[in-house]
Image: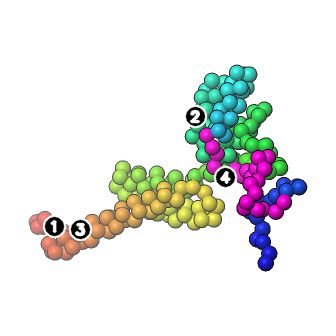
Amino acid sequence: MTEPPSRWPEPKGYAPADPQRPRPASYAMPVTPDMRAANADRERAVDVLKAAFAEGRLDQDEYNDRMGRAYNARTYGELVALTGDLPAGPLPVAMAHGWQQAWQPPPVQRTNSMATAALVLAVLEFFTMGLTAIPAIICGHIARSQIRRTSEQGDGMAVAGLVFGYLAVGLGLFIALIAVVTITHSGGIATPPGP
């Protein structure tokens, strides 16, 4: 019967995994950006930030901002983003080769402009007595189509623009229907008697 492969590669010169024999102290697991950071890792990052501030690499505001983010960091990736541009970093020596240089924080996603327009037009319905409802609906549908294609943010704003747009159109149709029913029920518009 063959033994299943171990989860982590064994170091050179080390016998196959044996449950009775502990791993040597020098053996460490590889680290990835999404691996959870420990309190000791956060403290190392804070030490790097303190040294950088003392050396004049960071100004007071940036130092305070990075310190707060370091104490709230949950993963190695977040700590690297805070200290990657400084001489030392918070990551263990056993880190996978090339990861620190290759890993970049994820790009900030932008909000779809049509979604913003849909929401603005939906809010303007209250001031224009519903005149911007149809443009809000059109912008909302275009925004949702673009968001599905580009993975931009703003889907909630597009949906809000659609909901308010359709509500305004529905309310306008309801008021028009009541007006028509009232006029036809009363026998039409009263005209003054002629001479």
Query: Along the polypeptide, which appears first: circle 3 or circle 2?
Result: 2
Question: Label 1 belongs to which residue?
Answer: 191
Q: Give the percent coordinates (x, y) of residue 34.
A: 66, 52
Q: Is residue 182 left or right of residue 125?
A: left
Vertical order, 5 against 50 (above or below): below
Q: Magenta region, mostly helix, strand or loop?
A: loop
Q: Nearer the viewer, mark 4 or mark 1?
A: 4
| Residue interval drawn in magenta | 15-39
In which quadrant will I find the C terminus?
bottom left
Vertical order, 59 against 103 (above or below): above
Q: CA distance from mark 3 to mark 4?
A: 62 Å
Q: Residues within 10 Å of mark 1 (few under 14, many from 20)?
A: few
Amino acid type of the residue tagged 2 in the rendering: Gly
Q: Secondary structure at mark 2?
A: helix
Q: Is residue 36 left or right of residue 13?
A: left
Q: CA distance from mark 1 to mark 3?
A: 17 Å
Q: Give the percent coordinates (x, y) of residue 73.
A: 60, 42
Amino acid type of the residue tagged 1 in the rendering: Thr
Q: Nearer the viewer, mark 3 or mark 4?
A: 4
Q: Is residue 30 visible?
A: no
Q: Give the percent coordinates (x, y) of residue 185.
A: 16, 75
Which residue is at the far front?
A: 20
Quarter-of-image position of residue 45:
top right
Amino acid type of the residue tagged 3 in the rendering: Ala
Q: Which mark is residue 179?
A: 3
